[in-house]
Image (cartoon, grey):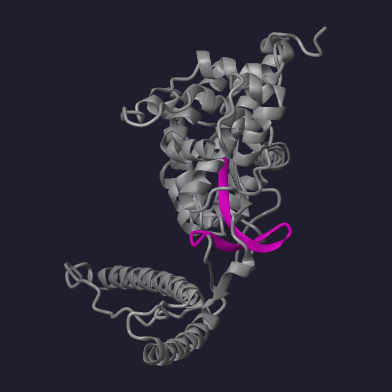
Amino acid sequence: MLLMPPSLDDWLPGDHSARFISEIVDECLDLSGIYDSYTEASGAPPYDPTMMLKLLLYAYSTGVTSSREMERRCCVDVAFRWLSANTTPDYRSLARFRRRHQAALGDLFNQVLVLCCEAGLVKLGRIALDGTKLRASASRRKSMSYERLGPRIEEIEAQVAAMLAEAEATDSAEDAAYGVDKRGDEIPEELRRRETRIAKMRQAKEAIEAEAKERARTKADERAKVSTVAKTEATGGDDAKGATSTEATPTPPINPKAQRSFTDPDSRMMRTNDGFHFAYNAQAVVDECSQVIVATRVTQAAGDVNELIPMIEATTASLKAANITRSPRVFVADAGYCSEANLTHIAESNINALIATGRTRHDERVSDSPRGRIPKNATRRERMARSLRTKPGRIDYARRKAIVEPVFGQMKVKQKAGHLRLRGLQGAQTEWMLHSICHNLRKLANARADAGMVMV
């Protein structure tokens, strides 16, 4: 008599991934950080945060990142209707929930990492670090380079002045014809739009100039530090005590091709697999055992060289939060993370890491089959290149691609993680953290599926 079973629970298969996510959220996660944010008693009661989190995790784990699409799925998709208890949260509520609980996602990531560790999915043998580009929610057509900003601002200002003069003349004529109290003195809508655009272009121009000044100031400080050290070594340290840099910060050179997006000013122009786009650089540290993400971060820098030390520190913090006392056996990273500062840091911190050094320079003394003692005057780069050429080093580094790069592929294909919905650096960090949580939940679900339970 019925086309569908009378109970909504009977519509969903027993081994469906939605049931797994519901079970994890209900029985394994502490949501006090989310519930504590609801302190006001005014207004209509919110949707149940537990239900909203289930919807968000299931949606992202299946590649549904649009809040409007989530609302539609709650009407037509059995799994979404089952998770939402046959209710339909509107897309604004879903989007606000995602934005509101950005801080709580870090704690949820650590809790899921603990579950993965308890399931034996994190062995901390080899762990690999790499970065991938995430397309920002910003169009290249809604941006302008620095060399075009100045002339364009002057051009629009001239247009605004002409329109103001024309409006003033019109107002005078209308006042004479219709009287002072008559309508006709409003600022045209087109003028308001152009004034708004001038303000945005000025903000972009100032941001580029400020970034150039900061780079120039950093370089000046580094030169002053090197000069002080050299003077100390030359004079024995007496004349350089208390010396400070008196060198004036030079006028910073500004790249005329530097661009800023008007829709997402935090994003930066980066090279992706399909050309240059406004994007963010997402970092991830991945364990070899089951490709579980141990630490994650999003940066505005297109290069990876400055992310090695922060990611090592983030890994230590994640393991500490998960009550894991042991350290990874070896960190593995590609040549994009190689610099003298990074090599010095891992050597002074006694971190076992293998970082590709790239092409061998003409003045470097590196043998293809290193044997015997390491020369005392060998540089950090030569020592790292030697370690990579040993038999254990070759074996460890050969596993780098197989550890971390499939994770990015799985997240971008399965979860549609390559294109961000939220704007701003904090929004990008929120979405990447959410994708990382869903990735680890899928790994945990697959491990349970191997034991004959459920699978995502």
**Residue 258 vs residue 345: left or right?**
right
In the depicted view, which residue is nearer to us: 452 or 319?
A: 452
Residue drawn at the location 72% of the way across and 36% of the way down? 414
Q: Give the range drawn in magenta.
A: 264-284
Task: Name the image quarter holding the N terminus.
Answer: top right
Whether residue 121 is visible here, answered yes or no, is: yes
**Residue 453 vs residue 348: left or right?**
right
Q: Is residue 272 magenta?
A: yes
Vertical order, 45 against 270 (above or below):
above
Residue 159: percent from left, percent from top: 50, 87
Vertical order, 420 against 3 (above or below):
below
Residue 33: percent from left, percent from top: 38, 27
**Residue 280 vs residue 346: left or right?**
right
Task: Name the image quarter holding the C terminus.
Answer: top right
Residue drawn at the location 52% of the way across and 15% of the way down? 26
In the depicted view, which residue is nearer to us: 42 or 358?
A: 42
In the depicted view, which residue is nearer to us: 9 or 258?
A: 9
Vertical order, 194 against 11 (above or below):
below
Residue drawn at the location 59% of the way across and 68% of the way down? 142
Residue drawn at the location 31% of the way across and 30% of the way down? 40
